[in-house]
Amino acid sequence: MGMNVDIGLRLEQVVQLMRKTIADGSTEEAVLDATNRRGRSIKCRVRTSPLQSGNGELRSVIVLMEET
């Protein structure tokens, strides 16, 4: 069984975006299929952005999800 967040969004797709952000510091975005809490199919925009320290070193990744 694959991992999902509670809106039915497959984490493997989100992890791919996060890995690209970690690899090259880019901001990535994709619109993915998901299911809302009422069981309705939705489109979810996922954006990953690098979180850098004051000296430009990658510290973490910010993940933003919103229904489109």
Image (spheres, rainbow, N blue to C red):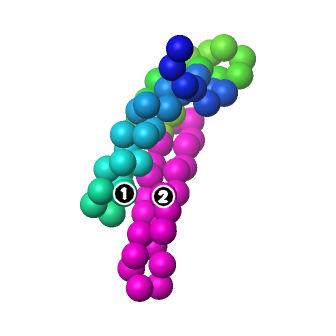
Residue at screen point 54% across, 49% down:
64
Residue with the most extreme bottom position:
55
Count of numbered circles in the view: 2
Measure the alpha-carbon separation of dots 1 and 2: 7 Å
- Residue type, label 2: Val
Q: Is residue 6 above or below residue 19?
A: above
Q: Residue 33: give x, y in percent of width and height.
A: 47, 24
**Is residue 26 at all visible to an observer of this figure?**
no
Q: Secondary structure at mark 2?
A: strand
- Residue 58 quadrant: bottom left
Magenta stretch bounds: 46-68
Question: Left of 57 or right of it: where is 51?
Answer: right
The residue lying toward the viewer, choosing from 27 and 2, is 2
Q: Residue 28: give x, y in percent of width and height.
A: 35, 50
**Is residue 36 at all visible to an observer of this figure?**
yes
Q: Residue 30: give x, y in percent of width and height.
A: 38, 39
In the image, residue 59 lies in the stretch drawn in magenta:
yes
Residue at screen point 47% across, 42% down:
46
Question: Left of 38 or right of it: where is 64?
Answer: left
**Residue under pointer 1:** 22
Q: Do the numbered discs 1 and 2 sit on residues whose CB atoms are within 8 Å?
A: yes
Residue at screen point 52% across, 57% down:
62
Magenta segment main secondary structure: strand
Question: Left of 41 or right of it: where is 25?
Answer: left
Q: Residue 53: give x, y in percent of width and height.
A: 48, 78
- Residue type, label 1: Ile
The residue lying toward the viewer, choosing from 33 and 51, is 51
**Residue under pointer 2:** 61
